[in-house]
Amino acid sequence: MGNALHLENVTMQFGGVVSVNNLTLDVPEKQIIALIGPNGAGKTTAFNCITGVYQPTNGLIEFMGKPMVRNHPTGKALKNYKGENADKYAKEAPLSPTPDQITGLGIARTFQNIRLWKSMTVFENVLIAKHQHAKQNVFSATFRGNLSEEKRMRDETMELLREQGLDAYKDELAVSLPYGLQRRLEIARALATGPKLLLLDEPAAGMNPQETIELADFVRQIREKYDLTVFLIEHHMDLVMNISDYIYVIDFGSEIARGVPKEVQNNQHVIEAYLGVSDKE
Amino acid sequence: MEQKKNISRIFIGFAILFLIVILLENLSSFIPGLPQVFQPTSPLFTVLKKAAVYSLVAVSMNLLNGFTGLFSLGQAGFMLLGAYTYAILMVPSDQKEQVYYLFGGCAFNFSLLDMFGGIFGKTGVGGAISMIISCLIALILAGAVAGFFAYLIGIPVLRLKSDYLAIATLGFAEILRAIFQWQKLGKITNGANMIKGFPTFSSFNITNASGATILRLSTFVPFLVSSVCILIIVLLINSSYGRAFKSIRDDEIAAEAMGISLFKHKMLSFVISSFFAGVGGALFAMYVANAQAKAFTSVMTYEILLIVVIGGVGSVSGSVIATFLYVACSEWWLRFLDSEQYIGGFKVPLLRNGFRMVVFSVVIMVIVLFFSQGIMGGNEINIGAFLKKISSKSERKR
């Protein structure tokens, strides 16, 4: 089985600060891969590069074996460039799709700080995520020439909510849900876009241990059910060690370790990175 | 099934509204000796006409500001485009010489009215048909021109956010106004002078052979056009695209991550909003019976923005209610403040020309300070549900 996602020499530099440095990793299909690291290690920046929020300064990102994002530093960025492999991708034209195009390819994400649409109900939150694949144009949508498609979208949304156990809340405002359910709704919304790869940015943030255990089962379940590849950022070591097939550890933007959970747990660099920054883990 | 019932109820609601309007404006010809309010010259009808026109523009602005979260202040500019398009297309050829006399005639010697007049005839029923068709086409073209310019200006401008977008669109509207007043374009725009002579609302009054009015429709026409346009906007807002607009308003980053193309949807909203602002501008030209760039200042945009805020950002029914209240206050109810008033022998102090605007400003400040959500907040009046309530009540009585 091939790689769902492949990052090669991805470097993201903001001014003089290198947030992600020469990151190379693989996310094989149908696996759960974790990216961990202390606070400020560049995990979310790496996610933002993958989802098109940022354009990486240098490097290549492939999705399902095809180049999706590619860039190399030019001009002033090249002069200030502190990373490596500056000329490796200089021959090929840069690729920088917008986030919505990347979502269209089949990558969906959740956010570290929940970003649900506040004025809308649970049902609408999921329904809107179906909009990008709707065939209707603005005229047929306005003059209701698309009733069958609209009905199909609504039915699918209802089905999805039922599967996620959110159907009881469908008419409530998304922000009125308890925290754990908001997280779940965000995942349901991401699933509604029909992804092949799901990126979870700290899905267990703010959850208690019981909720965290439930989340682990939940992530496994949705992987089976929707045939997904999951790539997640997480701070809860219990969760990461529990569900990941493979782990990448980064600190100060660079990879410091990789391996199956057992290996990473005993890696000296990882212990240092975590103990050196904070003593809470 | 319930939905179909609801739709038919809404249509019945509109039909009743139109009937009331037609009845109201013809009341004075059936029953002589009515109070001045019901006479055709009464401020009541001025208010109704102007409010019908403004409500369309307010709703179109709400689509952009309230539903898509784009703070744009270009509405007057798009109204101007619509008004001029309508005026230039509709002035009959034989009147062009007279209207453009300062510039020695018009460079654009074409009139929709004449074209359809040539097909259906210029008088009687044929004249009515040709006027209705040419007016409809001119209104749609007025919207299309505004929408086209919105598309052009949208390409660079929609990359901007919040205040910057507002400044850019405001600037665009002011530039347009200056260009339309430019003497060198006089052969088309009549320079700083007004274009007139095109069909207005009162052209829709049905007259008999001797020229006496049989049936007044001059208030009904703006009501009809605005209602249809607002209905289309409401349908859009409740469609999949409308939901996408709202998601952009609530959280752009999340919307983009869920596959909604920001640029495409912002552009759609901007163009559609401008289209209806253009139609509104054409209606405004019909209302004042002339088209002049001087009228479409930024003050007009602020007026409409004010209406949107008073009605509730993100509420169509709020915008409509606020328009009628606002226009009634500014054109009618507060007019007495502008002239000296006596209670018995006592002269009320302060009342003089311009005092109305002082009171008006205070009222607006109070509203903005204490009712910052506006009249409706983000809620809507559901006409269908309202009528259902009434009909079920009356059934119970039986």
Image: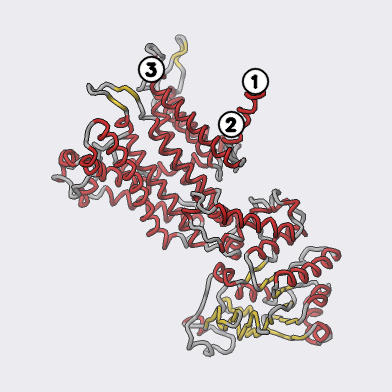
Q: Secondary structure at mark 1?
A: loop
Q: Secondary structure at mark 3?
A: helix
Q: Residue furthest left?
A: B104
Of residues A14 and A259, the one nearer the viewer is A259
Location of mark 2 (residue): B387
Label count reads 3
Location of mark 1 (residue): B398
Separation (CA) of disc 2 from disc 3: 29 Å
Q: Marks 2 and 1: which is nearer the front?
A: 1
Amino acid type at circle 3 is: Ser
- Numbered disc 2: what chain? B
Separation (CA) of disc 2 from disc 1: 17 Å
Q: Marks 3 and 1: which is nearer the front?
A: 1
B113 relative position to A81: left or right: left
Location of mark 3 (residue): B28
- Numbered disc 3: what chain? B
Separation (CA) of disc 3 from disc 1: 34 Å
Q: Do circles 3 and 1 both sit on a common chain? A: yes
* A202 in relation to A33, above or below: above
- Numbered disc 1: what chain? B
